[in-house]
Image (spheres, grey):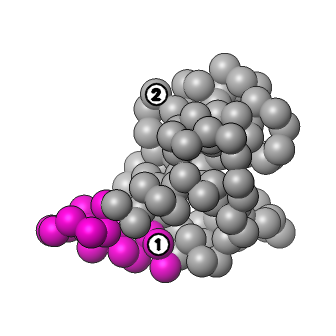
Amino acid sequence: MDANALMLPVEQNLRLFEELDGLLGDYDGVVPQSVREELSELRAGNGETATAASVAADLADRCDTVETEESYADDALHALAAGGDVDAVATNDGPLKERVLDAGAPVIHLRGRTQLTITRP
């Protein structure tokens, strides 16, 4: 999962893990360490973004943390997808969606305002 997906509960009033449960059934959520670092930086700010990042950081604790060689979060997610280390990437970031799909991995993203869907390459 990327920071964008983890911030959806605050930004879009989405029940993220309920939606993932309904969409995937049994799964193991993972978050790259670089995503955790991105959330930490965002939550240090002010306003709605900081609030969303704070909630997202708490939600990330429900997932396993994975280390990658990439320090930039989007690159880490792309590498995990391209290497076949994850079954799908959860993001609502347009450019990252395209990179993941080009790498041959499915993308879980927002459809409408409060529902997730999977797009396959």
Q: Residue 98 in the image: state x and y as whole percent.
A: 55, 25
The reply to whether discs 1 and 2 touch (Cβ–Cβ < 8 Å) is no
Rate crowding at label 2 as few (under 14), some (14 to 19) or many (20 or more) other CA atoms within 10 Å. few
Q: Residue at x 46, y 28 (%)?
A: 95
Sooner in the amino-acid sequence: mark 1 or mark 2 = 1
Residue 1, quarter of the rendered image:
bottom right
Name, please, the residue furthest toward the top: 102
Q: Which residues are magenta?
A: 42-58
Q: Residue 16 in the image: state x and y as whole percent.
A: 53, 68
Q: Residue 80 in the image: state x and y as whole percent.
A: 73, 40
| Horizontal relation, residue 44 to residue 30: left or right | left
Helix, strand or loop at mark 2 = helix
Q: Which residue is mark 2?
A: 95
Q: Which residue is mark 1?
A: 57
Main SS of residues in magenta: helix
Looking at the picture, tell me which residue is in the foreground, 93 or 85. 85
Q: Residue at x 66, y 27 (%)?
A: 101
